[in-house]
Amino acid sequence: MSASNESMTPFTGILSREEICALQHCCKHEKNLMVSIFDTGRKKFLFHNDTFKSILGYNTDEMTNGGWEFWFKKIKPVELKSISNLIDSLTGTSEALPPMHSGQAYTYHVQDIFRNWLLIQHQVSLLMKANKEFIISYIYNITNQERLDTILTEFQFCYQNNTVEISRREKEVLHLLGEGFSSKQIADKLFISIHTAISHRKHLIEKFAVKNTAQLIKEASKSDLI
């Protein structure tokens, strides 16, 4: 949230003017880090920095007024239960699970305003001030890291496929599969039984660690075996 008078009001008597200015100054230069402050006593967000808007596209006033429920609606459904339970335990809403530990990071996906899924790393710290407890959330956008990991995994998979060792007969079967021949046609062309042709195809699928013939042909073509 921008340094508006409304967003600064809840800090009156809790954080000094100097502390507020320092917080705003530090957050101003963060391009990939979202920071929020939550008052556990009042069950209310006091601050969101502008990076929430630049990364996710959501209005920070809406996020502040919507509370954690607004945030929960943006979490990937398959990840929601575990993350919401952890946050609820930390804020005192639920005691069903052990609370999030200060300094521990949790990784999950949230949806931006354009319905894209972004991978974030959420770390929390606890601040005691004037006998009140606040949760400081440091939320990093690590979507590019996830993309790089995916690309590197694909490169590794291709490299592994390049080192696949197949027999002369398997290479003949693979070549004919690439030309679109069925197992029966391959058996006829190579003068082998259809059972043997099917076995060669199954072994090739296993060696290339794929699920079907279409994927086999696709991966084999990357390794110049077709």
Image (spheres, rainbow, N blue to C red):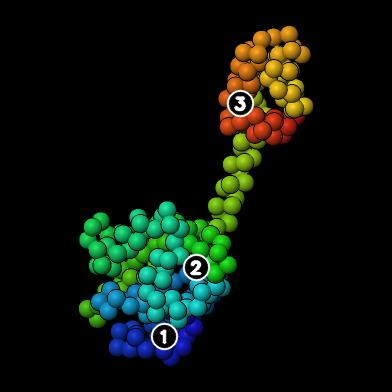
Which amino acid does the dot numbered 2 rest on?
Answer: Leu
Callout 2–callout 1 Cβ contact below 8 Å: no
Tell me the amino acid under the disc marked 1.
Ser
* Residue in view at x 60 percent, y 21 percent: 202
Q: What number is the disc on residue 33?
A: 2
Tell me if residue 60 comes above or below residue 86 in the rendering: below
Q: Are marks 2 and 3 in contact (CB under 8 Å)?
A: no
Mark 1 is surrounded, within 10 Å at the Cα level, by few (under 14), some (14 to 19) or many (20 or more) other residues, namely: some
Tag 1 residue: 7
At label 2, counting other C-alpha atoms closer than 10 Å, the crowd grade (few under 14, some 14-19, many 20 or more) is many
Q: Residue at x 75, y 27 (%)?
A: 180
Task: Describe the element under mark 1 as helix, strand or loop.
Answer: helix
Which one is earlier in the sequence, the residue at label 2 or at label 1? 1
Residue 182 position, x and y percent, is 70, 22
Q: From the viewer's perspective, tell me whether residue 95 is left or right of residue 17.
A: left
The image shows residue 224, relative to residue 32, as above or below, that is above
In front: label 3 or label 1: 3
* 166 displayed left or right of 51: right
